[in-house]
Amino acid sequence: MSILIGLMLLITVVASFLVLGLDRDYSKRIALFASGVVLAITILILITSLAQGSVSLSEQYNYVSAFGISLQLQMSAINFILVLMTTIVAFGTVLAGNPEHEHEKVANTLILLFEFAAIGLFTSANLFVFFIFWDVGVVALFFMINSLGSPNRRYASMKFIIYEIFASSLLLLGIMMIYFYTPVHSFNIQTIISSAASIPEATQAMIFFFLFVAFMVNMPMFPLHFWLPDAHTEASTQGSMLLSGVLTKFGAFGMLLLFSILPISREFAAPAAALAGFSTLYAAFVTMRQKDIKRVIAYTTIIDMGIILVAIASMNEFGTYGALFGMFAHGVTIALMFLVVGCVHHIFGTRDMRSVKGVVNQATSTAYSFLAGTFGITGVPLTTGFVADVLIFIGSIQAFGIIGALPLLGLLIIGAFLYFVINKSFLMTKDPLQRVDYIGVEQKIGYAFFMFFMFLFGVFPFLLLGLTNLQL
Amino acid sequence: MATIDVTYIAYAIIAATMALIIVPLATIPRKLSFVAMVASTVLLAIILILAAYAMISGIDVTVLGIFHLYPFSEFFIGLFAFALALVNMLSYEYYPNFTRFELFFSFAIIGMFVVAMANSLLTILLGLELMTLPTAFMIMTSGRHHIEAAVKLFILSAIAIGALSFALALIFPYSPELGLTQIAPNTTFTGNYLISLAIILVGAAMGFEVAAFPFNLWVPDVYQGAPGNVTALLAGINKKVAFVALMEIFFVVFLQFQPIFSPVLVLLSIATMFYGNVVALVQTNVKRLFAYSSISQAGYILIGLAVATQFGIEASIVQIVAHLFMIIGAFAIVLWLESKNLRTLDDYTGLSSRNKFAAFALAILMLSMAGVPPLLGFIGKFLVFSSAIDTQSLLYLAVFGIVNSFISIYYYARLIDRMYGGQKKELLFMGNYTYAVVIVALAATILLGIYPNLLISAASLASKTLLAL
């Protein structure tokens, strides 16, 4: 019994209300301090667990005792990798800040509230608690998109909340069905895993369908992804970093749970992987039509999440840890990319790749950070993305044969397109666009921060793999 | 010793209830508005404390054969006393002639408590009448432009009362006693069409009172036409009193007919949810929007009653409490903005820049109505849907509920979006009493949502004693 996870939750939620209540001059300092402490706790857990070779924490606090619901939190390697990703992205988001520096107080409040929800969700050992944190996170990001961002943000936020509440309604239904159809009536994930086989097949299929669709909206997958490009494009820089970096992992983590809970999911694994593969290719082709750099980055999220779902659906050890590593890599990398794109917009006043030219002359660090982020997304060796892609495709080829490597094609297409963007907008120095503004030193520290973690776990993958029992 | 104590508390509750009528009578001649407000709030607080004490000590006594004080009625007396104190303070702020309002209000309060502690069908009938007629007068005396709403409410509640008394007349030949528990043994035989007709009439009367589809056509007009504090009273408390009456009649008197009335309640709840939510989507007047939203909330409450298990009733009670706090808080804000002449969705644009607290509170209350955790509205909906899934044969009812919950997010989020968008305008200031009422409603919504144990166990006790388990 430890108190570390509870402490992390408490720090973030208290800091969130402090930021809301106190003067705006303190907001960034409090947010930085709180998310820094949480990051320090996570790294402390990492260091102590590496010595033991595994991580295993579990905590329990009283909640709705009438239904045997308590705030059960656990941390195994799976939960830990996601929590580490969340704390890194949240700290980096606060650190870098919005290049525009508007509404810092609201932004920091919502970032901390979202970090609270994300840590709670990724460590929940109980589906009821999982659902509560899920909705808190969604509502926090709804306000984040709604109150900060581009002129068209209100439309995007409505679209976002409608899709996400649709998902959470199905999620609630699925969770309640699991609770009442298992003979023991429990929300605890371990108890459900051990007794889920007794649910009738037809009911299991129904529950699988509800939960799969719910997580599909959130990840997002092809037919239900329409909220994502708008939400990411219209949100502020910090909003996009959190949306893409952390929120999409809610769905992926849910998929991991779903595939481990229901025995029937083995039958649906191949169709799910096929859908994910199709989604990857579809998004890759759609990306090539985009003119807005932020939209390009938004679509790479769909591609990466598709690949992660393929890994989850392969349902073997390589696939699972590959998916986790993929989520980690994607979270850190995409946060860097959105930060870079936000800075490009700030510097040049536009994000249209036809007019942005010569970034490398006007803002050198921004251009090279974009290049590094592209390495991360395309999985160049020594980045975390490389380790993730290797694990993922070993897993999917084990499960589905050589056809499991097909989603790699999507990655190739998007890689080629991103290098095209780099060539056209970032490195081309012929008639460069004049800059209209400068970025502060915070953003540059932000670049360095994300790049550090992107390369750290790529150069030394055993820092994370040491927590798992994966034999390489 | 113990029994004497018990009876005294029951008498004390009844005496405090009756004492409420003295307050306006004493203050009207001198127009002592503030004294009237304080005195009635204090009396309501006393009733709340007595009821809470009675419920904790599990008092179960029958007084004069017409009142029955047991945990179920004590729970609702306490709840209504608390909510009525809120409405009382809210009304004080907006009424120049508060003592006249207080007179009708006191009669209505007595009617509500009489329904909550009724032990016979006749008491329920009288209590309902005592509640609705003064409410109509409250609307009527608020100004000339409220008369249409008052007349609508008066006529329709007269029809409801008429149907209920006709049902009583049909039951009376079979059961010489009209005590709630005494009717059931006399009406056991099957194929009795007169009793079936009586059940239908009771259902129709209660449908009017709780505003279930298709008996809800009066609701938007009356809610919109009435002054905001009376709307808060109608949506927050009157409707809940009707639910109490419905529970007392269906689950004590007609429990053996449950296989007959349950499917009807299922249909009513589905239709009510869909009607309320779908029509609310296109509303532009905020008061009307909340009127339709409260119709749909009545549909959610009906789910638990349609399930008709102890768990279902418990869930409905939690949802009743949730909706009571949410809607009183919401209408307090709507009333305050109406007094500043802001009525439509467009008027609410940029509310956040004019009064941060009001926008925040209304946003939280609406998120709670939409069922977003960890707020009280979510706990209520979660329990209600769970109770439907628990029976396994009513899974589709939970699915319909969740579909509706999803539909409703659109109009709530649209209003939240309006409030947080738009240009900066001049600041608006909220009166102290409104502020206090909103704070209390908001605190109840958040705290009971985060820590619902107390409420759930109280609701569980109330539902068990209702079914005499």
Image: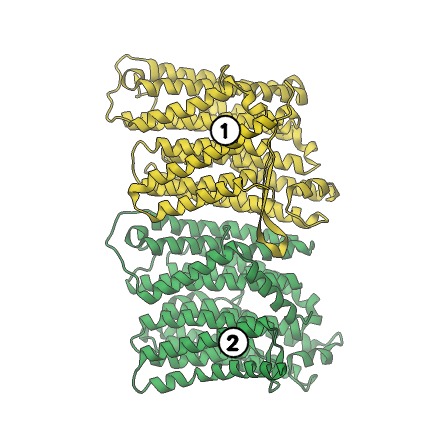
Question: Which chain: yellow?
Answer: A
- In the picture shown, does residue B101 fall above or below A295? below
Q: Chain B's shade in the image?
A: green
Front residue of B444/A417: it is B444
Residue A377 visible from this viewpoint = no
- x and y percent of residue B323 in the render? 49, 62
- x and y percent of residue A134 in the render? 52, 43
Counting the numbered discs, the total is 2
Q: Horizontally, is A190 left or right of B243 in the view?
A: right
For label 2, the SS is helix
The amino acid marked with disc number 1 is Ile
Q: Quadrant of the N terminus of chain A?
A: top right
For label 1, the SS is helix
Front residue of B294/A85: it is A85
Residue placed at 49% from the left, 76% from the top? B47
- In the picture shown, does residue A183 fall above or below B45? above
Q: Residue A344's image quarter?
A: top left
The amino acid marked with disc number 2 is Leu
Q: Residues within 10 Å of mark 2 (few under 14, many from 20)?
A: many
Q: Quadrant of the C terminus of chain A?
A: top right
The alpha-carbon separation of the residues under discs 2 and 1 comes to 60 Å
Q: Residues within 10 Å of mark 1 (few under 14, many from 20)?
A: many
- In the picture shown, does residue B336 fall above or below A428? below
The chain holding disc 1 is A
Q: Which mark is residue B50?
A: 2
Q: Which mark is residue A302?
A: 1
- x and y percent of residue A144 in the render? 39, 41
